[in-house]
Image: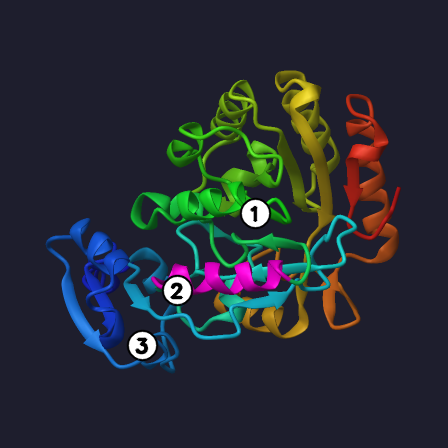
Amino acid sequence: MPISEKRLLTPKFSHIYIEETVLEHPVSSSIIRHFPDSNIITIRHYKDVFNRRKQNFHLQKRSPKLILATAKPPFLYRGAEVCENFGHGSFHCTSSILNCLFDCEYCYLPGRYTSANLVIFVNIEDILSHVQHLLRISSLYLCVSYDTDLLALDRLTSFLARWLEFAAVNPDLLLEIRTKSGNTASILTRPPLDNCILAWTLSPDQVIKKYEKKTPSLDTRLRTISKLMEHGWKIRLCFDPILRTPSWKKDYINCIHYTLSMLPARSIRDVSLGCFRMGKDYLKRARIIRPDSDLLWYPFKLENGVYTYPECTRREMLNTVSREISRFLPREKIYCMGDFT
C-alpha cells in the first residue's frame, strides 16, 4: 500500500455518524459505549453520508465508519429470485444492518452500495412490530442476515438475542440467520428453536483464503457448528456460492468429505447448493471496484438479468457436489438452486 494511502487510514469505527432522531436511542447509547475514543458526528439522514458520490470503497473497507440510523418502511422485501426459498411461498428478507465486516470477493454488496461503511438501523423494535403484524395475517419465512453477517456484529448490536426471543413466542415465523461467523454467545445461552434456522456458509479453505477475506477458516466454522449441534441445534449447511476455480472439483469434494465426516448427520437440518450468480448491474459495478478479480471477470452468461455460469457448467458443478453430499445424507435434504440434480 502506498505511504500516501496509509496516511488516509484511521482505526475501524474511528467516526460514528448518528441521525439526530436516534441520538438517545438505547441501541445507539450501547454501541457508542464500545467506542469511547470515536468521533461522534450528528447527521440529518444516513444517506447524506452513505450515498455520497465518489467514495473510495477499498479505503472504506480497510477503515470503515459506523452510521446509526432509523429504518423506515417498508421494513421487509420479497426474497430475490437469485435466493433459494426452500419451497416457501412467503419468503422475505429484512435488513437491520447494511454492509458487512467480512470482505468476500463474490459478494453483491459492493455492487449494490457505493459505500463500504456500515449502517445500523437501531430501531429494531419497529421491524419486530411490523413482523408481528404480518404474522397475524399469515405465516412467514424471514431471512434477517441478508445484507450483512448478523452474528459477526452481534457483540455491538445484540440484535440476534432480540430475534431469537421474538421467534420463541411466534411459532408461525420461520427465521433464517445465515453466517460465516464464529460468534455464538447469544445462541448458546438459549434452548434450540425449531422455527429458527442457523445456516453456515462453507467453502474449501482454498476459496476462503483467496476470496473470503477476514472470515473464519473452515475449521473454525465447523467447530462452531459442532458446538451448537451439541446444544441441540440443527444446522443448515450452505455450499453457496460454488466457484469454478481451476481445482474446484477436487477442492469441493475434499471439503464435503471433511465437513460431513466431522458433523453428525442427524444434526444437519439440510444442505443448500448454488453456483455464483449476481445481478447484471451489481456485477458491472463490482467489476469497476475489483478490476483485477479473476472471479468477477469470468465470462459469465446473462440469464434473465443475472450473470452466472452457463447452464451446462452449473449442471456439472451442482451434480458433482450434490452427488458427493448424497453419500452422507438423503437426497431430500439437499436443495439445489436451479434444481440441477
Q: Amino acid at mark 3?
A: Val
Q: Main secondary structure of the magenta part?
A: helix
Task: Give the magenta range.
Answer: 121-136
Q: Which residue is mark 3?
A: 49
Tell me, for residue 116, which label it has, or none. Answer: 2
Work out whether mark 1 precedes mark 3 in sequence or the reverse, and give the earlier one.
3
Alpha-carbon distance for marks 1 and 2?
Answer: 34 Å
Alpha-carbon distance for marks 3 and 2?
Answer: 11 Å
Work out whether mark 3 precedes mark 2 in sequence or the reverse, and give the earlier one.
3
Q: Residue at x 65, y 40 (%)?
A: 238
Q: Position of residue 281 (x, y in %)?
A: 62, 75
Q: Which residue is mark 1?
A: 170
103 or 330, which lies in front? 330
In this rendering, would 20 be left or right of 265?
Answer: left
Q: Amino acid at mark 1?
A: Asn
- Asked if 283 appears above or below 124 in the picture, the reply is below
Q: Position of residue 216 (x, y in %)?
A: 45, 35
